Structure formats: structure tokens, C-alpha cells
Amino acid sequence: MIAPDRIKKPVGGMGIQVSHLTEALEKDFHFDLIGYPEDDPPANYIGVKNPLPKIPHSALTTLASQIAYFAVAEKLPKPDLVHAQDWSTYLAGVYTAEHFNVPLVVSMNLSVIMLETIGVIFAKDFGAWDGYWLHRTHCEIELLGLRKAKKIVHVSNGYRKRFKHIAEFDKKTVVVPNGIDLMAWQKFKPKKLPGHAKLKVVFLGRPAIMKGVIPLCQAKIPEEIDLIFISPETGGEFDTFQEIIKKTENEKNVHYIGPLFDQEKIDALGSADAVIMPSRHEPFGIVALEALASRSILLSSFVDGMSDFLTDHVAINCGTTKESIEKGLKKLVEMSEVEKNRRIEKGLEICREYSWENAARKMKSVYDEVINDSSIEKKKNEKAYSNHRSRQD
């Protein structure tokens, strides 16, 4: 499995997904995992360093990283299949599968083609000839992976719909949603969050345009609320991260505390009153489940994958604009305790439906089917070759 994230200190939901699914499936499959460098990786994990650390251009370093991923993968023992996560590893996945002559499975954790529809481009100047083709190169890599894959795994029905019009892809697509370990999220120690306002509202995620960070930074935060950014400096865009820092420096009720992981993250969300996700684009939105599991009120844009499980009965629709975010925060400030408790209970019901065990069962079916089909195809090819040789003899 090639996944551009970490499993112990993940940058985003992909690392969380990979960690839980591989753990749940370890009795059935052995995984060799390739991802970002970890401080203390498990035995089956190989971290790949950025081969061009002096190049501050994500589109170029993503291309170079695919070469680095393949260079590691082709030295491993032959697998039964190769699983590549989102477009940024598809090229490495295609060549690894071809190198070993095994089937390829791809997950659509994020689509560079779909990012273009909201104006997120993998080039500073899309209008320039070089910028245009740099972005198009990533789009073609995504299409190549989707064409070569035996199975395409989407993390939500909401995201699958964006590709449903392409019959070539849809007929080999399956949905394996993300999950939540509800028991782990019910055990938290109160954590003192910064600020002196009555309500604590957390933004948890990468500093990326797709996460709605810019309009959130533009919005006026009510004096009754402390807005707290729990976000890494990396994994998103440098300019977007600077907007977070600028807002914390200019407004006394806005704070930045860096990334949190594992129990620290659970403690922080469990101590918050609400979590805000004004995302413009969200293949699934695993933070939404984490917010519901932590018994926080969720403010969400409901876009893409989040529409699979969110309604106005459980979350506040904060939209994706400065004005809609301000309206959502005002609704939170005015909400009664009775209404908050009703939404919290509804959120916990949703979490019970989205367990990692359910997700693992679906992924196991994908692997079993692909490996079985590959075995049947191999036997057919061997028989055909044997018949051909017999005729020659």
C-alpha cells in the first residue's frame, strides 16, 4: 500500500483510515506500507523522504515523490496486489503493479480533477503555458490510475457521484466509507483550551483552501467564542497557513495550538463546545465523525462526502462563505442546551453506523475479489499458453 501520509501522526484523514483498516485486516493480509517518514515506524512501514527538499513547489515534489515511492516498492517482496491511495501515488502504483505483474487497486481519497472544479490548481499561474500543463499532468496521472485499476475504492457515495457519468470507472467502483472508533472517543480528559470566551470552537485540519480556511479567517468571530486552530504547518498551502497566523495575531479570541494526535486530539475535541468544517471540498470528512464522537456541536458545509451522513438535524450548516460562517456561529451562540443535547445524541447514533469494523469487512471483500479474479486470469493465461505450445509441438 502506497499512501502519502503517516499512520502515527497523520496529516489528514487518509493516514487515520490506513492505520485503522490495516490494523483491522492484519489477520487476513500482510501489508507493506509506504508513506511519509515516521519517528518510530512499525516493522512493515517504510517512510519515504521528499527527494527534492529544496524545491518549494508541491506539484513538482509530488511528481518526484512518485519516483521515490516506486524505488522503494520495487525492492519489496512480490505482493498479491498493489493499493495506491489518491492520485498523488497512482503513477507509482501503476508501475509497481506492472513491475510485479499483479493487480492494482486505487482509492479516491482526493481527486486533483475535482479540486480544479473549486479553483484549486496545482500551479501558481494556471493561465501560463507551463502552469497549465503542470496541472494537466497531475490530472492525466489520476486518469491513468483509474483506467489501470481493477477496482476503484471511493470513501463516500457523495464523492462517487462526481465520477458516476464515466461508465468505464463506475462499473469497477465500490464505496468503502471511513469510520470511527467510538469507544476511544468516549474516554477523554478535560483539556484547558486557550481563551476566556464562553464557547470553544475548534477548526481541525490541514491549512488548505479546500478546507474553507480563507473564509473562516475572513469571518468575524463573535465575542462569546474562542476560535482555536488545531492544524499542522505542512500538508496544505503555505499562504493559507499564513492566513491562520495573521488572524491569531490580530484577534484576541482566535488561537493557534499546532497539530494534536491520538489522545491529545481526543481530549481537545472532547473539551470543545463545537467543531467547524466550512470545507469547499471533502471526499468524506472524517473530522466530522470525530466531532460527533466527541459530543461536540458540528458546524459543516455538508459538501461532497459529508452529505452521506450529515443533515440539519444533527449539524449546523455553516456553508462556505464568510457570511454563512458568521450566520452559523451566531446560531451556535443562540442554541439552547436542550437543542445541543438532541443534536449530540443524534451524532452518536451516526457514529455507531460508521465503525472501522464495517469498513474493514468491505475492504476485505474488495481484496478477496481482486486477488481471486487475478488468480483465475493467471490460470487461464497459463492454460492458453500451454495449449499454444502443444499446437506448436
Image (spheres, rainbow, N blue to C red):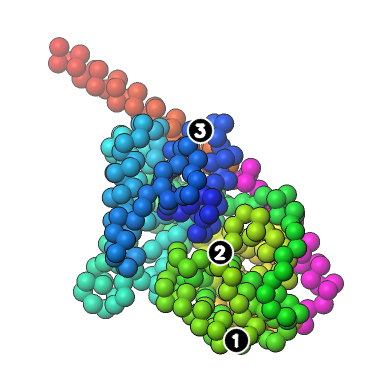
Q: Is residue 195 magenta?
A: no
- Looking at the rendered structure, the kind of residue marked 1 is Glu
Q: Report how far apart the C-alphas of labels 3 and 1 lie in the structure.
A: 50 Å
Asked which secondary structure carries label 1, the reply is loop
- Numbered tag placed on residue 6 in the rendering: none
- Numbered tag placed on residue 29 in the rendering: 3
- Going from N to C along the chain, the mark reached first, 2 or 3, is 3
Residue 387 can be seen in this image? yes
- Quadrant in which the C terminus appears: top left
Chain part drawn in magenta: 334-359
- Quadrant in which the N terminus appears: top left
**Residue at (47%, 37%) from the top-left corner?**
43
Residue 295 can be seen in this image? no
- Going from N to C along the chain, the mark reached first, 3 or 1, is 3
Q: Nearer the viewer, residue 115 or 17?
A: 17
Q: Is residue 335 magenta?
A: yes
Q: Main secondary structure of the magenta part?
A: helix
